[in-house]
């Protein structure tokens, strides 16, 4: 802790904060302020989350009955592609890094802004341009390849592949810009006293995420370009008829897209670390273990892509190596889970809405992660591959965990971002509904997959109907919970009670006013302790540092 | 001009740039020219299966010269070197695994005509 | 937004006032930190460029292993001598680039501008030589994929794949050369205006790094594409 919190409740006129300092539309659209860019990203990703969620519901409604329900098979194919692309490229990848991360990262390390503010703003507009290209292409003709763009289907289908590919390519640039900005910021802009051993865990997870964004995204870029060229000129690079190798596309695609899974889940682990420390009133148990395991996941995440290809013609030898390497991710994740539980243990727990979400997060990470270990076992995967088991697995570990952490982060930092309190009762109710909804949606899908129902199919045998109905019912519950969240967050935004730090958190981002002033800090902060330092006696402190 | 008085930053890289002359660039240029000639010349010598390995060793050496001297990684140790190192490790792993996959595949499923 | 407090503090601190402080952005502590940040950002960007080409190198290693004879035969259609000329041009341009930066450090603005112009000229001549090579390939029928129609290689499996990769890799590389030449043109203008001083020359250094990366990639493309035979 470095400096006293500048008091916000001066009588009479309040000091300007980043929200009130400039209120014209131009002051937002042309801002260089990382906080405003973060808020704009939050608004955009929430919008795309809503759209992707509507698509998900439509898919679930279609699957209520074994035959046609509300749409044609073609529309169904386009819909699940749309759901995948919107949710992955437009919601999950930018949600926590570009939204919450942009807002919090400079605050957490005592910087005035990110290293390249203009690039930061550009990354938002590039993201929007990419979104318009991708969605425009989808609306113009639709795309039915699924978000994976596997050849030879993607190179031969008559739907509009190229605009969507280029859209995804452009969104990739936005991701690279954010990652580049974060790494440079963390390296060069830490305040005095902010040693590597004091960097908040959220920032460590952002660092690891950024490494993946920078190193993996370009490979996706070149892959998408090659598909576009293949479609335009039939160059044969992925065409078996011309001696090409369709499996090469899968290699290149998953070289990006498996690490990309950690772009989605590592930030949520960072949120979990912050919320658990802040609401358990304890320094992180195993700070170094959590920090290094983030880097470990980022690094190992690059060496495991082949576990998506066990049933392609990839060789058994390569598959075996990838399968074994995949287990390493489990080790790093387990280190984190043990450390979080160690942090919770003996803490002074303030059980509130964000905490509820984090409990859900831990459950989904453990349950979903364990099914992942099972799927990484080659012999088992041959049975489960391309069934609903895989769908349920990644919706548990990747989607549920990310959404849990995103919501936990939004609730935990809502007072920080907007200076307004959230209604706890509604928050807890919605959190309960959402956690229940996720379980009710995806547990039936685990069972369906194990019974052999393939993913992406329009129709299914009648004996699968009961579980499908259960899954759709769960999805409705989930949607209902999210509507409640949207309602009370919207209310709190306007009518919420003004608060500064309702959690009494000693995370570094709370060391400035809520909402922060435009320059973040009145004076450059100097850090003398690690974050979440709740213990004042020096000998006790050692125990918790671990 | 650039005297020691003007900057107090300890061992900052800009400093070292000021200190050395252009000699190292000329040496690097000559080395690159010689290695380019060598790689072209060896192309006319029959090396059989070693040709690729030799060509790659020369290319890596040339790359190191460019990276260390023209791109100043000789002076800028630390993070930029780490970035390049990690990038090369990942790229090599990518090539090795795709290669390992294609040589160990079930023959009929490997790309062919 | 205002940079005044930091600037005036620096200006008093420093005896020489070369206008460099005007380039300090408000959120950086001083010009050294700003230069470090710029360099670090550039290296991260370069690593994305390396991996962008990396996907193509991965494809190359796969297909070369599958079609050794096809690649061997197809490579003979390329001229190693023209490739050597390409290499010589790029290496020389790298040398002039690094000397331009060196001259800026020595405050020899005019020499730097001339060296930058030579660099751009060499870059454009590389594009010319390569265009000539493309024209040669196209007239011989050495085109990518299914457009490939070279009589003497009719039965060689993989020759078409070689040209697919050849056009993708050198095409992407040539686009980079053109972008690099564009960037250098802008940098030349600002160097001529006298914006860059030993204390503030990050844009020029980063432009140089980009140019050297182009050279670096070519160093690997040359033996892999031209010298298989």
Image: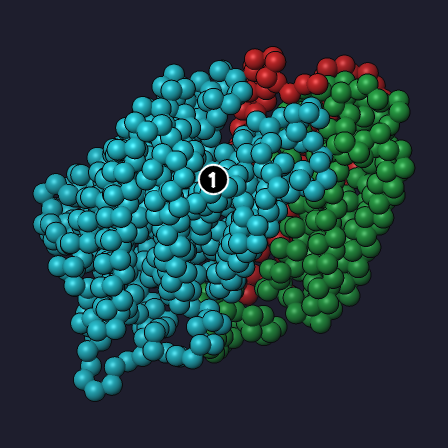
The residue carrying mark 1 is: A73
Chain A, colour shown: cyan
Q: Is residue A497 above or below residue A281?
A: below
Residue at 44% x, 38% y is A259
Residue at 47% x, 39% y is A73
Describe residue C63's horizontal placement relative to residue A354 as left or right: right
Residue C150 position by quadrant: top right
Residue at 49% x, 72% y is A30
Chain C, colour shown: green
Can residue B24 be seen by looking at this rendering?
no
Describe residue C161's horizontal placement relative to residue A357 as left or right: right
Residue at 55% x, 41% y is A220
Q: Nearer the viewer, residue A285 or C62?
A: C62
Q: Secondary structure at mark 1?
A: helix
Describe residue A401's horizontal placement relative to residue C121 as left or right: left
> Which percent across, then down, holds residue A441?
27, 40
Chain B, colour shown: red
> Which percent across, then down, holds residue A17?
32, 75
> Which percent across, then down, holds residue A524?
34, 67
Q: On the rendered image, what quadrant is the N terminus of chain A found in?
A: bottom left
Q: Is residue A311 above or below residue A293?
A: above
Q: On the rendered image, what quadrant is the C terminus of chain A found in?
A: top left
Residue C76 position by quadrant: top right
Q: Nearer the viewer, residue A471 or A312?
A: A471
> Which percent across, then down, holds residue A244?
66, 26
Toward the top, the furthest residue is B107
């Amino acid at each position: 802790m470095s400096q006293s919190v500048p008091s916000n409740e001066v009588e009479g006129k309040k000091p300007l904060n980043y929200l009130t300092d400039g209120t014209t539309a131009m002051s937002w659209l042309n801002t260089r302020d990382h906080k405003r860019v973060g808020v704009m990203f939050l608004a955009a990703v929430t919008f795309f989350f809503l759209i992707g969620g509507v698509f998900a519901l439509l898919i679930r409604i279609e699957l209520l009955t074994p035959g046609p329900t509300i749409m044609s098979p073609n529309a169904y194919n386009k819909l699940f592609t749309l759901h995948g692309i919107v949710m992955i490229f437009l919601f999950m990848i930018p949600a926590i890094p570009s939204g919450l991360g942009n807002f919090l990262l400079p605050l957490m390390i005592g910087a005035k802004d990110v290293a390249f503010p203009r690039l930061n703003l550009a990354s938002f507009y590039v993201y929007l341009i990419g979104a318009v290209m991708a969605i425009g292409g989808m609306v113009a003709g639709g795309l039915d390849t699924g978000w994976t763009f596997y050849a030879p289907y993607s190179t031969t289908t008559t739907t509009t592949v190229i605009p969507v590919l280029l859209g995804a390519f452009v969104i990739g640039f936005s991701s690279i810009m954010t990652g580049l900005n974060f790494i440079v910021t963390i390296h060069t802009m830490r305040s005095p006293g902010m040693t590597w051993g004091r960097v908040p865990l959220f920032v460590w997870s952002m660092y690891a995420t950024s490494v993946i964004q920078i190193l993996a995204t370009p490979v996706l870029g070149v892959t998408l370009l090659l598909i576009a060229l293949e479609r335009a000129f039939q160059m044969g690079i992925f065409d078996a008829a011309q001696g090409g190798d369709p499996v090469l596309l899968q290699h290149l695609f998953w070289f990006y897209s498996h690490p990309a899974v950690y772009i989605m889940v590592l930030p949520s682990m960072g949120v979990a670390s912050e919320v658990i420390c802040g609401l358990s009133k304890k320094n992180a148990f195993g700070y170094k273990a959590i920090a290094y395991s983030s880097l470990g996941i980022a690094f190992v995440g690059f060496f495991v892509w082949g576990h998506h290809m066990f049933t392609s013609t990839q060789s058994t030898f390569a598959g075996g190596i990838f399968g074994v390497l995949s287990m390493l991710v489990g080790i790093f994740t387990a280190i984190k889970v043990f450390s979080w539980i160690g942090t919770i243990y003996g803490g002074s727990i303030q059980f509130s809405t964000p905490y509820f979400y984090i409990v859900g997060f831990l459950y989904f990470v453990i349950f979903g992660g364990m099914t992942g270990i099972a799927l990484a076992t080659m012999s088992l995967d041959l049975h489960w591959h391309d069934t609903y088991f895989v769908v349920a697995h990644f919706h548990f570990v990747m989607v549920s965990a990310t959404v849990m952490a995103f919501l936990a982060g939004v609730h935990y930092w809502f007072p920080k971002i907007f200076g307004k309190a959230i209604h706890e009762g509604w928050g807890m109710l919605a959190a309960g509904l959402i956690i229940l909804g996720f379980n009710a949606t995806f547990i039936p899908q685990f069972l369906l997959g194990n019974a052999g129902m393939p993913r992406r199919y329009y129709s299914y045998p009648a004996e699968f109907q009961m579980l499908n109905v259960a899954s759709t019912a769960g999805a409705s519950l989930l949607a209902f919970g999210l509507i409640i969240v949207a309602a009370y967050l919207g209310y709190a935004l306007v009518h919420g009670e003004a608060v500064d730090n309702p959690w009494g958190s000693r995370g570094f981002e709370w060391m400035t006013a809520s909402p922060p002033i435009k320059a973040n800090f009145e004076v450059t902060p100097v850090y003398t302790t690690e974050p979440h330092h709740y213990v004042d006696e020096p000998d006790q402190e050692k125990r918790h540092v671990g | 001009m650039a005297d020691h008085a003007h900057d107090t930053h300890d061992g900052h890289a800009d400093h070292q740039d000021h200190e050395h002359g252009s000699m190292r660039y000329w040496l690097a240029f000559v080395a690159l020219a010689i290695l380019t000639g060598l790689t072209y010349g060896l192309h006319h010598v029959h090396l059989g299966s070693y040709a690729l390995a030799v060509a790659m060793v020369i290319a890596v050496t040339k790359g190191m010269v460019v990276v260390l001297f023209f791109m100043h990684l000789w002076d800028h140790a630390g993070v930029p070197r780490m970035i390049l190192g990690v990038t090369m490790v990942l790229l090599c792993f990518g090539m090795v695994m795709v290669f390992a996959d294609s040589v160990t595949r079930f023959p009929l499923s490997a790309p062919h005509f | 937004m205002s940079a005044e407090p930091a600037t005036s503090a620096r200006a008093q601190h420093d005896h020489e006032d070369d206008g460099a402080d005007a380039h300090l952005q408000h959120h950086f502590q001083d010009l050294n930190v700003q230069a470090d940040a710029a360099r670090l950002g550039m290296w991260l960007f370069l690593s994305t460029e390396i991996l962008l080409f990396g996907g193509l190198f991965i494809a190359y290693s796969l297909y070369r292993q599958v079609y050794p004879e096809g690649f061997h035969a197809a490579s003979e259609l390329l001229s190693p001598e023209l490739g050597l000329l390409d290499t010589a041009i790029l290496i020389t341009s790298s040398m002039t680039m690094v000397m331009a930066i060196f001259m800026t450090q020595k405050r020899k603005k005019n020499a730097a501008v001339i060296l930058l112009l030579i660099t751009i000229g060499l870059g454009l001549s590389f594009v010319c030589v390569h265009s000539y090579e493309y024209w040669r390939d196209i007239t011989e029928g050495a085109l990518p994929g299914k457009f490939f129609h070279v009589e003497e290689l009719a039965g060689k499996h993989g020759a078409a794949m070689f040209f697919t990769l050849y056009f993708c890799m050198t095409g992407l590389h040539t686009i980079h050369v053109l972008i690099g030449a564009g960037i250098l043109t802008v940098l030349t203008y600002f160097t001529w205006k006298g914006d860059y001083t030993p204390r503030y020359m990050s844009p020029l250094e980063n432009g140089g790094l980009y140019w050297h990366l182009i050279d670096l990639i070519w160093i690997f493309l040359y033996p892999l594409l031209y010298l298989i035979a």
